[in-house]
Image: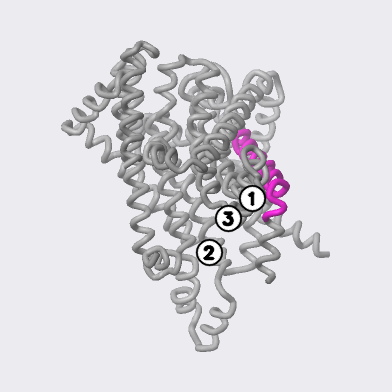
Amino acid sequence: MKSVKTLGYVLALPVLLVLAWWASTLGTVNFFVPTPATLVKKFANVWFSERFFTDVLPSIGRLLVGVVAAILIGVVGGVLIGSVRWLRALLEPTLEFFRAIPPPVLVPVLMLLLGITDTMKVVVIISGCVWPVLLNTIEGVRAVDSVLSDSSHTYGIDGWARVRYLVLPSASPQIMAGVRQSLSLGLILMVISEMFASSSGLGFTIVQFQRSFAIPEMWSGIAVLGLLGVAMSFIFQWAERNILRWYHGQKEVENAA
Amino acid sequence: MLGLAGIVGFLLTWELIPRLGIIDARYLPPASEVIAALARDFTLTAFWVSVGETMKAWFLGLLIAVVLAVLLGFIIGSSNFLRKATNSTIEFLRPIPSVALIPLAVLLFGVKIESSLLLIVYASFWQVLIQVLYGVADVDMVANNTAKTYGLGTMARIRYVVFPTALPYLMTGVRLAGAVALVLAITAELVIGSPGLGREIALAQSGGAISGMYALVLATGLIGVLINLLMRFIEKRALSWHSSVRSEVIV
C-alpha cells in the first residue's frame, strides 16, 4: 500500500502534465509544439540510427574526458594549493578572477588558439569545470579538523599517507559539491562548444534542425539533452551516496545525539 | 600582498609567453596590449552600451527567476502533499541544461533580449527554488507551534517564522543564481547573438580584432567579480541579524 502511494506521488504530476500537453495539441496543428506521438516517433527515428554513433557518442565521450580531467586537475591542484599556505595566498585572487570569467567566453578564445578540433572542445570543458572542483577542494583542505591533523602529525603520518587517509576523506564532501556543479557546467559547455563551432555532435545537430525548421526533430534533440542531464544527475547521486557513505552516517549520528 | 604578487606574476607570464614566441602573438597578444585595449574600451560609449545590455538581461532574468521561485517555493514548501507530488517533476526538469533551450529561444524570439531572458530565467529558477524548498523545510516545529499557540495566522506565521528561517537559504540561492545568470546572459549573446558583451566577443573574434576580444573577455571576468562582491554584500546586509553573519563580525 505504501509503495503504491509513493509511486502515485512520483508519477501523478508527470502523467497530468503529459495529458495536458496531449490534450492541448489534440486536433490543432501548432508549428512550434509537436504532439507527444510525433515527438516519440521522431525521437526514435532520429536518435536510434547511425546518428547515435556519429553525434551522441562522440559528444558524451568529449564530455567524459573533459569532466574527468577537470576533476583530476582540480583535486590535485586543490590539495596542493590548500595545504601550502603561501601558495594559497599567492594564487587566491588570480583564481577568483578566473572563476568569475563566464566559461562560454573561452570558446572563441580557445577556438583561436587550438582551432576547431576535438581537443578544443575538451579543453573548453576542462577550463570551465575545473574551477568549482579546484576552489571547493581548497576550501575542504583548509577546513581539515585541526585535532585530527595534529594527531596524524603526532603519529608520524606524513606525505602521501596523510593525503590519502586524512586530507582527501575530510575534504571529500566539499569536493563532491564542486563535482556536482562542474557536471552541469560540463554539459552546458559541451553543447555550446558544438553549437559554436563543430561539424558533429549533439549541439551541432540540434542547431541544424532548428535552422532547417525541423521542429519535432529539434524538440527530440532537446529531449536527448534533458535525458542526458537527468542521467548524469542520477549517476552522480548514486556515486555520492557511495563515496560519502561514512559522512552521511556520521551526520545521522550527530543529528540523533 | 602575496595575492597582488600573484596577479602581477600572472600578468608577467602572460606578457612573456607571446613575446618569447611560445605562442604566436597573433593568437595570444601580450598582456600589455590587451590591457591597453581594455582601457580604450572604457572610453567608448559602444562598450558601455553593450555592458548595459548584458546587465539589463542579467538583472531582469534574475529578478523574474527569484520572484517566481520564491512564490512557488513557499507554496510548494508549505504543503507536504505538494512537496511530495512535485518532487519527481522538479528533479527531472532541474538537470535539463538551459542551453538546450537555445534553439527554441531563437525560434520564438530571434536575436532579442527575450531569448537571453528565457535561458537566464530557466537556469536561475531552479537554483533559487531548491534553496527555498530546503529553507521552508528547515522551519523549527517548536517555533511554528509556539506561533500557532500565540494565535498567529497563516500570513503572520509565514512573515515571522517561515520567512526568517528560509532567508539564509534564499540568499545562498540568489548568490548562486546571480553567477549562473551572468554565464547564461553571456552565452545567449555569444551563441544566439542577442545584444550585449557576448555578441561583441563573437564579432571581435570573427572580425580578427584579437586584442579587442581578449579585452572583452577580461571585462566579463571583471563583471563576474563585481557581481560576486555585490551578492556577498547584499547577503551580509540581508542577514545581518543571523548568527552566521553576527559571529563573523565578532571574531
Is B223 positioned to the left or the right of A78 in the image?
A: left
Q: Which residue is mark 3?
A: A145
Q: What residue lies at 39% left-to-right and 13% top-to-bottom?
A: B22
Is A185 positioned to the left or the right of A20 in the image?
A: left
State the SS at label 1. Answer: helix
Subunit of label 3? A
Magenta stretch, overall SS: helix
Above/below status of B249 relative to B223: below
Q: Which residue is mark 1?
A: A152
Q: Nearer the viewer, mark 1 or mark 3?
A: 1
State the SS at label 3. Answer: loop
Q: Position of residue A168 (x, y in %)?
A: 62, 44
Q: What residue lies at 51% left-to-right and 65% top-to-bottom?
A: B74
What kind of residue is marked 1?
Answer: Ser
Q: Which residues are magenta?
A: A223-247
Asked if the magenta segment contains residue A239, the reply would be yes
